[in-house]
Amino acid sequence: LFLAADPSNATRLRLQQECRDIQEKLNLSAQRGFLLESRLAVRTKDIIQVLLDTKPQIVHFSGHGTKFGGLCFEDEIGKSKIVQPDALASLFKLVADKVNCVVINACYSKEQASSIAEHIPFVIGMSQSISDEAAIAFAVGFYTALGAQRSVEEAYHFGCVQIQLEGIQEHLTPIIYEKKK
């Protein structure tokens, strides 16, 4: 499940390109058992409904994060509406029987990832600001590896290496958390 929010009062992101690139890599993979559902301009009131409707194994959020750990979704008129880490962690606790991995491809999402990892086996976040180019490169490497039947941990490393291959100096920005057993 690809969720994207690009509020009109924030810097524009290339979220449709990221979604398209992920879809392309999954379609090219040897393991074509992936079905990518996407929702753009996601509002806070959409999140529960889409999780219950799609029952995803992987949830990928792309958008903006705040320096204080919040994620920016959209309100009714397309402006930023910040969701705090504890709120999303509470939500993922309720769907932990279905979701195996959460990728938060947004600046400063480390705190969100850490909170969600209390309930979900693998969660990837960004330790600091990340450029659009690096975020997309990470997603391409990550989903290329998943499509080739590599583990989530291995896919994470492929995503970081893809950033390096593109000549971008942000390969240490993505971080992975594993649920404590």
Image (tube, helix red, strand yellow):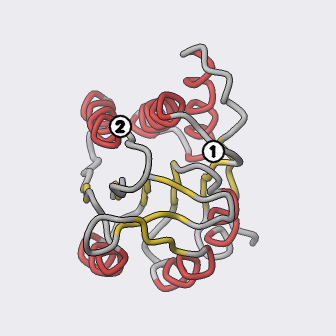
Question: Relative to 53, is 158 above or below?
Answer: above
Q: Amino acid at mark 1?
A: Glu
Circle nearer the viewer, 2 or 1: 2
Residue 5 in sight in this render: no
Q: Earlier in the sequence, mark 2 or mark 1?
A: 2
| Lateral position of residue 65 relative to residue 18, left or right | right
Find residue 23 and report its horizontal and vertical position in percent: 27, 38
Residue situated in front as seen by the camera: 125 or 117: 125
Q: Residues within 10 Å of mark 2 (few under 14, many from 20)?
A: some
Tell me if residue 110 comes above or below residue 155 in the rendering.
below
- Estimate the x, y position of residue 78 in percent, counting from the top left: 29, 64
Gap between marks 2 and 1, in whole Å? 26 Å
Q: Is residue 170 above or below residue 49?
A: above
Q: Vertically, is 72 above or below 104? A: below
Q: Which residue is mark 2?
A: 14
The residue shown at (68%, 74%) is 118
> Could you say which is closer to the camera, residue 150 or residue 166?
166
Q: Based on the displayed image, in which of its 4 quarters is residue 31 positioned?
A: top left
Task: Give the camera-side residue of 61 and 145.
Answer: 61
User: How many labels, in total?
Assistant: 2
Give the residue at x 25% y 59%: 39
Residue 181 quadrant: bottom right
In percent of width and height, residue 87 lies at 55, 82
Residue displayed at 62% across by 52% down: 125
Q: Position of residue 152 (x, y in %)?
A: 56, 47
Look at mark 1 in the image and give the residue it sits on. 153
Q: Which mark is residue 31?
A: none
On screen, residue 151 versus residue 67, left or right, reads left
Tag 2 secondary structure: loop
Residue type, mark 2 in image: Arg
> Does residue 67 show up?
yes
